[in-house]
Image (cartoon, rainbow, N blue to C red):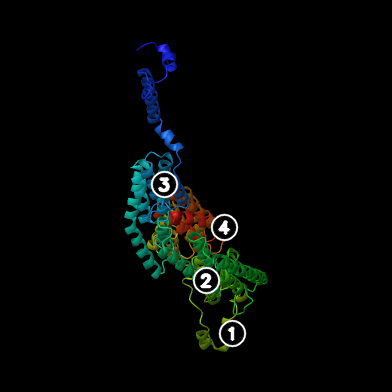
Amino acid sequence: MGNVDQIGVTDVRAAARPPRAGASAPATRRSPLFWLLWLLILGMTVATVWCYQDQLRSLIPSTSLNQVLNRADQALAAGQLDGHDGNSARELYEAARALSPDNDRALQGLRQVATAELDACRQALAAGQVDAADQALAVARELNGGGVIIEQLQRDINARRGAGDKLEQWVQQAQAALAAGHLDGEGGAGPLYQQVLTLSPDNPVAAHGLDQVGAAMTAQARQAMAAHDLAAASDLISRLAALNPDYSELPVLRGELAGQQQASADQIKADLAQADQALHDGRIAGDQQDTALASYKAALSLDPQNAQAQAGLAQVAQALIMQANAALDAGDADQARGLVAQAAQLAPSSAELAAVQSRLQGVPAASATDTAAGAGPAAASSAASPAPSPQATGGTEATSVDTPARVSLTPAQQAQVSQWISQARQAAAAGQIMLPPGGSAYDLYRQALSTDPDNAEAQAGLQGLPARAQQALVVAMGSGQLAKAEGLLASLDQLLPGDASLGVLREQLANAWIDQAAQQLDNGDRVGTAQSLHHARQLSPRNLRLPRLYARLNALH
């Protein structure tokens, strides 16, 4: 290869020699080592460019690619995720990938589109738009290729599609219930429309139907207020609030009810004060409007559940029964019967009333006409006066025609009376106070008194039934036998009409039913919950715990 040190050094001697005439200039010669170095440098350059082509490519400005990516980002921000006009985020990102298959910005953009489509699927499902949800999920599946989240959303979509037939069935049932006037409660139009809206919140038929239910209940509440049945109106408004708390007429209804309640409360207060004064003055009953009976009835016409007015009627009945006993003691059976008849209208099953009725059995009614015809005017006049005492007749006992005589019983009758009394005691011990008919303690004691009106044991047993019923009621509530307790409370209502203690027992039993309803609701027993709440509402329509439980019940589907 020669002397390497002399590479590129011009030969001085050759340079000093002048060229020959007519000879051309010699060509510059390159040594093989020069060309080897040059090839080595070129190879290294090509290898570097090949290895770092992505980084080098990104350094090269691409105006067209950047424009496409910028448009894709804008479409993504605007929510234009997919389409067929070339302006959606998905189409633009895919166009960018066509220009640059490995572009990171385009790949990240497509992942963002897939995530946005999943969110759109969830939102559409929540709104009940199954087709839109399915379409969004299909795009996400194409971009992501599947996954746990996508499969779960697909199952949700399939389940919602399967519920479509159920929704239609609920709508039909709700429309039929609305036409039949069955507005709320189990199988009512309101709860059925609520079930539809739970699965399909934007369902226009269900939303309109729920408004129709609200309008019907509003009309019923106003009818109840017009009839001065404010308890029923309050109950309807509470049920409407539990069913549709956002109903537009609710504030107006509540205002109307509050105004009527205040006016009614003022009038009831005045009626009760007048009734108490009349009772104190001895104006018990009669045709006048200022009697205790008339005033208590006026108060009850405004508030049928008013405890004070009911207790007042019980006092009126008690006063009439006392007057009837006094009339019997005076020998005036006809006056006693009239007083008993009035008392029976107020307290038909009162134990004390039954006792005085037993005294009247077997006492013939005095006929003033017959007496006057047989003995002339003087006799007729004496028939209207009290019977003379034994001292007035010279020591000889004179028995008035209205004075009850002691009944003489045969041995068979005495045995029968004893048997009835024994059966009555057993029935009372078993809590069979007023039921079953014919076999209750009340009926058995009365059978005994119908045969032996003066039987002291039967009279005492009959008058002791209220205490036995109250004791049995407390035991039944404590053991959870609420239906039995309710029957005993009904018996007490008949035995002690208007008694103040019954209001306390009624509230206790209502709360026991509500406690049972809450437990049934926690266990998912909708039917049992509705039944228990119905019992509670019958006992205490204004109980403050009822609206919340009705709202929870209606929210179930």
Foreground disc of the pair 2, 4:
2
Q: Is residue 261 left or right of residue 152?
A: right
Among numbered discs 1 and 4, the one appearing first in the sequence: 1
* Viewport quadrant of the N terminus: top left
Q: CA distance from mark 1 to mark 3?
A: 112 Å
The location of residue 344, given as percent across then percent down, is 51, 70
Among numbered discs 1 and 3, the one appearing first in the sequence: 3
Q: CA distance from mark 1 to mark 4?
A: 48 Å
Among the 4 quarters of the image, the one containing residue 11: top left
Type of amino acid under label 2: Ala
Q: CA distance from mark 3 to mark 2?
A: 59 Å
Q: CA distance from mark 4 to mark 3?
A: 71 Å
Residue displayed at 45% across by 38% down: 60
Helix, strand or loop under label 3: helix
Q: CA distance from mark 2 to mark 1?
A: 55 Å
Q: Which residue is mark 3?
A: 113
Type of amino acid under label 3: Val
